Image (spheres, rainbow, N blue to C red):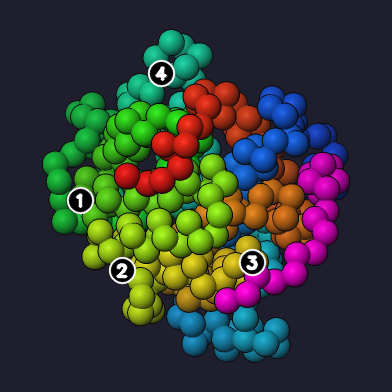
């Protein structure tokens, strides 16, 4: 597949100022750095995919094509609505749980309790008590268990094979760049508060390492090699040929995400393809947006989508990116390839 011609990117300060006159801040790290651009692209990409996909969550591809017949049968604009009746630009648990995790990681370092799983669990409780627009059953069950007995993980359970731990792990990747051991340890700790299943574990670690490689700026050929090598080593997640399901089962989610990411080089094309598969469209959209956003960088994200994101989401995401990167150690060549 040939790389499409890239249009000049709209300056990101212009986009954010237009959407949020109060001024989301970019001054925690150098906004001109390539790493910051990729990291912000990943986090904003996650939020954009979430906001776009939520409109068609739980629909089938045929239902989407019918409902959007006047627009060529394709859903491609951030308009809100859906079964959650969201406002345009509003995000769901994919983004808000990520922000809760990011806050916990930052709070832990401020309190000299770095990567404290108890603080992460407490953040999930606070998020849940804040009445989010949506909360998956497995996430709810894990949070209630923690409130009941204080356990930071439940026993391994067949019902824990959903995508809820995967969808929120981006802050861990940012906070542990350059430290593979810390990344894997914290990723599994946050995951098992609500999801304890080998396929969930594998997806959280595997997709996280792919994200870390993309954040470190590997080229397209190397990224494709990493992606296919990981799928070959974890055959449950093989996505070629694409099976075509996009449910909340973590295998279906990962297959849709990797197919969308590898087959569509442009950010918008990758995210639009994923969400138009329907089913758990907010999460597949968020995860494709995360990977594709890390690939293209924040300054190449679609401006018409960015200005639709709610201002509080823009502020929270932007502030977290700089702060989380400040926790990480410098990347080294050894950290560019997934183990």
Mark 1 and mark 4: Cα distance apart in space: 26 Å
Query: Which label belongs to residue 198?
Result: 1
Residue 8 falls within the magenta-colored stretch: yes
Residue 240, percent across and down? 36, 75
Please give left or right for residue 21 compared with residue 290 in the image: right
User: SS for tag 3?
Assistant: loop
Which percent across, then down, holds residue 110? 50, 14
Residue linked to disc 4: 114
Seen from the viewer's position, the closer of residues 258 and 1 is 1
Residue 266 is marked as 3
Q: Main secondary structure of the magenta part?
A: loop
Q: Is residue 73 above or below residue 121?
A: below
Question: Residue at horizontal 58%, vertical 76%?
Answer: 1
Task: Locate residue 191: give its quadrant.
Answer: top left
Mark 2: which secondary structure? loop
Q: What span is colored magenta in the figure?
A: 1-17
Real-space CA distance between mark 1 and mark 3, rounded to the nearest whole angstrom: 32 Å
Q: Do the residues bearing badges 1 and 3 touch, measured as CB atoms within 8 Å?
A: no
Camera sees residue 91? no
Nearer to us in this view, 46 or 159: 46
109 or 9, which is in the foreground?
Answer: 9
Q: Residue at x 67, y 87 (%)?
A: 72
On the image, numbered disc 2 is attached to which residue?
Answer: 238
Q: Is residue 107 visible?
A: yes
> Nearer the N terminus, badge 3 or badge 4?
4
Q: How busy is the neighbourhood of tag 1: few (under 14 within 10 Å), some, or many (20 plus)? A: some
Quadrant the C terminus occupies: top left
CB under 8 Å between discs 1 and 4: no
SS of the residue at dot 4?
loop
| Residue 78 location (% of width, % of height) | 68, 64
The answer to whether the residue labelled 3 contacts the one labelled 2, judged by CB atoms less than 8 Å apart, is no
């Amino acid at each position: 597949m040939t790389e499409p011609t890239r249009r000049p990117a709209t300056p990101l300060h212009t986009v954010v100022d237009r959407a949020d006159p109060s001024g989301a801040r970019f001054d925690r790290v150098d906004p001109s750095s390539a790493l910051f651009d990729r990291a912000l692209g990943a986090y904003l990409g996650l939020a954009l995919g979430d906001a776009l996909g939520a409109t068609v969550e739980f629909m089938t591809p045929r239902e989407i094509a019918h409902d959007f017949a006047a627009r060529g049968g394709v859903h491609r604009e951030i308009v809100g609505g859906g079964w959650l009746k969201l406002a345009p630009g509003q995000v769901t648990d994919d983004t808000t749980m990520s922000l809760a995790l990011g806050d916990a990681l930052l709070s832990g370092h401020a309190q000299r309790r770095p990567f404290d799983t108890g603080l992460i669990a407490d953040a999930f409780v606070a998020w849940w008590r804040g009445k989010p627009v949506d909360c998956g059953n497995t996430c709810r069950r894990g949070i209630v268990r923690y409130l009941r007995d204080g356990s930071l993980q439940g026993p391994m359970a067949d019902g824990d094979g959903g995508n809820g731990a995967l969808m929120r792990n981006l802050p861990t990747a940012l906070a542990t760049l350059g430290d593979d051991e810390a990344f894997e340890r914290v990723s599994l700790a946050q995951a098992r508060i609500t999801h304890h299943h080998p396929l969930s574990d594998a997806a959280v670690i595997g997709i996280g390492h792919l994200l870390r490689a993309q954040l470190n700026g590997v080229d397209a050929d190397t990224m494709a090699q990493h992606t296919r090598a990981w799928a070959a080593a974890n055959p449950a997640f093989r996505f070629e040929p694409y099976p075509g399901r996009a449910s909340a089962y973590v295998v279906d989610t990962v297959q849709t995400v990797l197919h969308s990411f590898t087959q569509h080089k442009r950010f918008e094309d990758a995210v639009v393809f994923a969400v138009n598969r329907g089913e758990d469209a907010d999460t597949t959209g968020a995860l494709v947006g995360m990977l594709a956003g890390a690939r293209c960088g924040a300054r190449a994200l679609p401006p018409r989508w960015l200005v639709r994101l709610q201002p509080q989401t823009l502020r929270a995401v932007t502030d977290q990116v700089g702060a989380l990167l400040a926790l990480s150690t410098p990347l080294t060549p050894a950290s560019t390839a997934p183990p």
